[in-house]
Amino acid sequence: MTSGAQPSQANITIDDVCLTDIPQIIEIDSEITKIAKPELWYSYYAPAGRSQPRWFLVAHEGERVVGYILGEVRAWEFGSPPCGWIFAIGVSPDQRIGGIGSRLLGAMIERFRPTGVKTIRTMLHIDEHVLMSFFRSQGMAAGPFIQLEASIDL
């Protein structure tokens, strides 16, 4: 496929991540964030001692990874009932606008459904306009929690 060409939805499959997918996920994430984080992505692939259900999915076009999503059911933080959290989602910039992100989110929601959660959440930087637009287009809006932070000067 040439750069910028949109994939046919029929050519895209959503699968559980495999170890061989991780280098391509690192490449996509690095292209989006401008920071390579191989240790982080390999740690997501092989979480040790996880008690909550977690899913790491990829969108493939043939052998090529064109997107990924990472989600988990989290329970009871700060009085919140169990909900599905989206920790990461990314689509190769040359494959955007083709519905891949929507399909990845839909596949994650299908993983969440049998757990009984009724809400999905995510957190992103206020300047992440592309992600903000994507999540809003999927029906997400500000929730009942406010994120707070402080600098740690040691």
Image (tube, grey):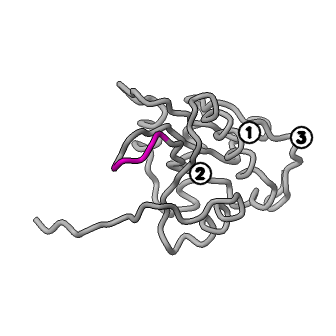
Closest to the camera, between mark 1 and mark 2, is: 2
Is disc 3 surrounded by few (<14), some (14 to 19) or many (20+) residues within 10 Å? few
Question: How many badges with numbers are in the image?
Answer: 3
User: Is mark 2 in CB contact (under 8 Å) with mark 3?
Assistant: no
Q: Is residue 73 magenta?
A: no
- Which quadrant is home to the C terminus? bottom left
94 relative position to 111: left or right:
right
Inspect the image, locate mark 1, and give the three-letter code of the amino acid beneath it: His
Residue 99 spot, x, y in % from top left: 79, 53
Residue tagged by mark 2? 89
Give the SS element for disc 1.
strand
Q: Nearer the viewer, residue 35 or 55?
A: 55
Residue 94 spot, x, y in % from top left: 74, 60
User: In this picture, which residue range is highlighted in magenta?
Assistant: 78-82
Q: Please tell me which of labels 2 and 3 falls first in the chain.
A: 3
Residue drawn at x 78%, y 36% as measured from the top left: 13
Residue 2 spot, x, y in % from top left: 84, 56
Residue tagged by mark 3? 10
What is the spatial separation of the Cα atoms under label 2 and label 3, in whole angstroms? 21 Å
Give the SS element for disc 2.
strand
Inspect the image, locate mark 3, and give the three-letter code of the amino acid beneath it: Ala
Q: Please tell me which of labels 3 and 1 falls first in the chain.
A: 3
Inspect the image, locate mark 2, and give the three-letter code of the amino acid beneath it: Ile
Q: Main secondary structure of the magenta part?
A: loop
